[in-house]
Amino acid sequence: MLTRENARVARQPCRERHSSRSGTPSSGYRPVVVWIKSQWQNVSRGFWFFPGLVALAGAALAVVLVPIDRAARTEAFPLAFDGDASAARTILGTVAGSLITVAGLAFSITVVTLQLVSSQFTPRAVRSFLADRPSQLVAGTFVGIFAYCLLVLRTVRNEGLEDDGFVPALAVTGSIVLGLVGLVLLLVFIHRITQVIKVENIAARIASETASTIDRLYPEQYGEGVARDAAPASWDVSGEPAVVRPQRAGHVRAVALEDLADADLPASARVHVRVRPGDLVTCATVLIEVWPRTAVDQATHDRLRGLVSVQSERDVAQDVGFGIRQLADVAVRALSPGVNDPTTAVTCIGYLRNALEDLGKRRLPDRLRRMGEDGLLVYAEAREFDELLREAFAEIGRFARADARVTVAVLDALAGIAVAARRAGALDRAAAARELAEEIAGPAIEDARTEHERRLLAGCVERVQAASG
């Protein structure tokens, strides 16, 4: 059973506390599904997995075509290559050398682009850029063509006294076709890169991912939930809980609440999930509390820990706030003296407005819920609407106080959000938008350079107040 040792253990370094740094439980049951999902996100959104599959496909094509060449006669392919072994080697070597050079160029361009995205916009958008499938396809194809040519080249044989020789006509023809395809893909890749690094497209990509996450996580329209604040306070009177802490510091990427019912806790237990996707945790952070303490043995403790995926990077899959944070970061960076691009800030504000208008009409999940057939009582922390609203606009409003154009865009966005929330019946959300608008507009009106700007800002505040009811 877990005892008072928790307090002492929390003060120990991670390496002393846990036998593994892998992010999976050190003993007992391992929530395999949660771990696999987390690792799959890392793999599928990286820049090596999909290109690697494409490169393997090129190698597999060579393995398939060469036996066909051996089994069939050259006459069976009237348009196939009809040169000798020396010509075949020259063609294959030329295509292979050219494509590996092009692949090196493509990877160099990719690295430079990543540096530009990280420094000019936001380093948090790099993960999204690496997951761009068209760019991955092109990079993988270059390597795949190179591998194809090498595998075909090793099968070419000159005629000798004891050897009839072998020229894989169909495979050599394939290398010529693939070489031409590689040249076309080089143009496609350069065009793609020039489009991807445009700030409008970066913002649109982030906004699209955020909108998809909102649709998936919050499918229901606005509605009142159960009481949200009383449960853990009443549970505290029953004694000290068993606590679960992470094995490593990092960002909470996912919390598998649906798997709590399989954690072998009695129906009378009470569970408080204290972290949310996107939270930054340390080794001493409490992830989960369980009452009574005696309900948690070491095996159950490991199961509960594995339900919270802690990784080095945030991901938008369960974290709407991460998409909002990226758009806000791009807008703030655009307002910095080194960049000074208010148009980009206004663009990001427009996408933030779209996301918050949509979110303002949605029902956020209840914190207090019952899980599984036994009705295990769980209180899970969640991000509130006003918190996401402030994350989207508070920082932008602070940096834009000297730029009336950007401040007006922020206030107009808050007015639109207030209208959407009020129409859905979420009057508290509309009030939160009005409060934030007044907070942003006050310093901006004081710093306004002309009387026209002051009247313009004051009119925007009045529109927000009217929209919020």
Image: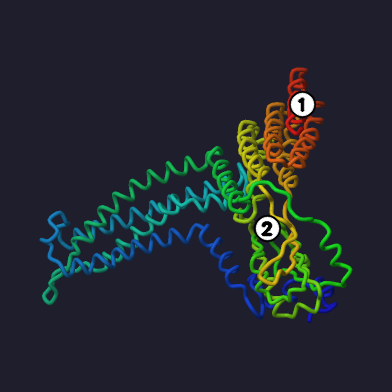
Residue for point 41% across, 57% down? 140
Q: Is residue 8 above or below residue 356?
A: below
Considering every residue shown, the one lying at the far right of the view is: 237
Task: Answer whether residue 116 is visible to the viewer in this image.
Answer: no
Residue for point 52% across, 46% down? 113
Quadrant of the drawing holding the C terminus? top right
Judged left or right of residue 377, residue 28 is left
Query: Residue 34 at x, y = what percent?
Result: 60, 68
Where is mark 1, residue-wise?
462
- Could you say whether the residue bearing mark 2 is in a helix, strand or loop? loop
For label 2, the crowd category at 10 Å Cα-Cα, with few meaning under 14, some 14 to 19 and many 20 or more, is many
Residue for point 77% across, 42% down? 428
Say which quarter of the image contains residue 252: bottom right
Query: Residue 152 at x, y = what percent?
Result: 26, 65
- Amino acid type of the residue tagged 2 in the rendering: Pro
Query: Residue 466 at x, y = what percent?
Result: 75, 29
Q: Pick the residue in front: 240 or 315.
A: 240
Quadrant of the drawing holding the N terminus? bottom right
* Res. 277 mark: 2
Q: Pick the residue in front: 426 or 396.
A: 426
Of callouts 2 and 1, the N-terminal one: 2
For label 1, the crowd category at 10 Å Cα-Cα, with few meaning under 14, some 14 to 19 and many 20 or more, is some
